[in-house]
Image (cartoon, rainbow, N blue to C red):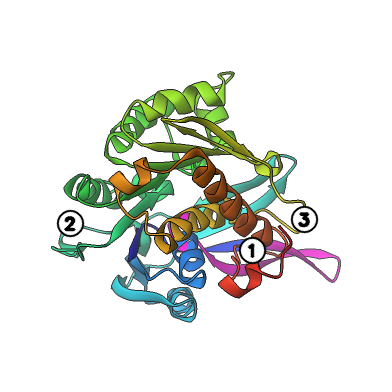
Amino acid sequence: MLIVAGEALIDMTPAVLNGSTAYVPHPGGSPYNVAIGAGRLGTPTAFLGRISRDGFGQLLKSHLAASKVSLAYVKEGDQLTTLALVTPSESGEFFSFYCENTADRLLYPEDLPPVLPASAALHFGSYSLVLEPGASTLELLMRREARRRLISLDPNVRPFLIPNRDVYIERLMGWLEQADLVKVSQADLQWLYPGENPETIAQEWKQQGPLLVIVTQGGQGAFAVTSRGIANVQAPRVSVVDTVGAGDAFMSGLLSWLWQRGYWSRAALGSLEREQITDLLNFAAKVAAITCTRAGANPPWQEELSQMPG
């Protein structure tokens, strides 16, 4: 099974109502979205994190359950749910986070399960690896389980929450040492390493420990750095409503493809041939493209994939 660890929040997404801008609540959070996407694609999935007992928290839990995601590793808290205000811009979306003393960031070591199923893979990412005390708790879990099971990572950088880029990069290097599969957006790399070549950075990241480093490029597609060279794919052409959750949908597509085909370990990941990696990227790109055709982080169900050409 797949266990996704991290934040669960509410995206406040803008919409026009009677000529004015209104904000509509959508369940979100990068790891949360990955769990939702994987569950809908038929991958046995559980969410590991802390969710509020407030009204938004109830929405988050019911949305997980409706998407066939297990709540077995969910802890509840009396603190409020984190809110992320989504502001569209020419380069995509900008997120403002209201997350001081909120439930999802207050995950402690005693909240972690002492033992995980032998066949489980773990996914980490986004601001849950930045905001304390939850960040140190998840790093503890990552170090504890590294090389014992497949570990995937999507930094999903949130500059609004990172006071010092150099300190963040140093911490990121430690995560790369534990990870087997890494997905990162080109926009993230541009913020982390201004003016540097994304392919060069991906090659350098791979030297830190991952067997596969994948860089998503929005409408330009994606590429993967592997021991067998570089694999590139184009993004499917769709009518874009918004791109919220597209990267998370891509990540859920990657993990679901690996699960469905039995590549559920570091050794199996390393055995992938270039053609298989291209298939992997194309599948994930298709999942992300469908997500872009509707508002909010709303990844597709398995049966929807057959309705899209390609």
Q: Relative to the observer, which residue lies in front, 73 or 210?
A: 210
In the rendered image, which quarter is residue 294 located in? bottom right
Q: CA distance from mark 2 to mark 1?
A: 32 Å
Q: Residue furthest right?
A: 19
In the rendered image, which quarter is residue 178 located in? top left
Point 41% across, 23% down: residue:
204
Location of residue 256 in the rendering, given as x and y in whole percent from the top left corner: 46, 61
- Type of amino acid at the residue the image marks with label 2: Pro
Q: How many marks?
A: 3
Q: Looking at the rendered structure, which numbered label has been put on residue 109?
A: 2
Location of residue 18 in the rendering, given as x and y in whole percent from the top left corner: 85, 71
- Type of amino acid at the residue the image marks with label 3: Val
Q: Is residue 291 magenta?
A: no
Q: CA distance from mark 3 to mark 2?
A: 43 Å
Which quadrant is home to the C terminus? bottom right
Q: Looking at the rendered structure, which numbered label has been put on residue 238?
A: 3
* N-terminal-most mark, 3 or 1: 3
Q: Is residue 27 magenta?
A: yes
* N-terminal-most mark, 2 or 1: 2
Determine the main secondary structure of the stretch shown in magenta: strand
Residue designated by label 1:
296
Label 2 residue SS: helix
Q: Is residue 59 left or right of residue 131?
A: right
- Front tag of 3 and 1: 3
Which quadrant is home to the N terminus? bottom left
Q: Is residue 133 visible?
A: no
Other-residue count near label 1 (Cα within 10 Å), few / some / many at <14 / 14–19 / ≥20 = many
Residue 29 vs 282, above or below: the answer is below
Location of residue 29 in the rendering, given as x and y in whole percent from the top left corner: 48, 58
- Type of amino acid at the residue the image marks with label 1: Gly
Write down the region rendered in magenta.
14-32
Q: Is residue 25 left or right of residue 140?
A: right
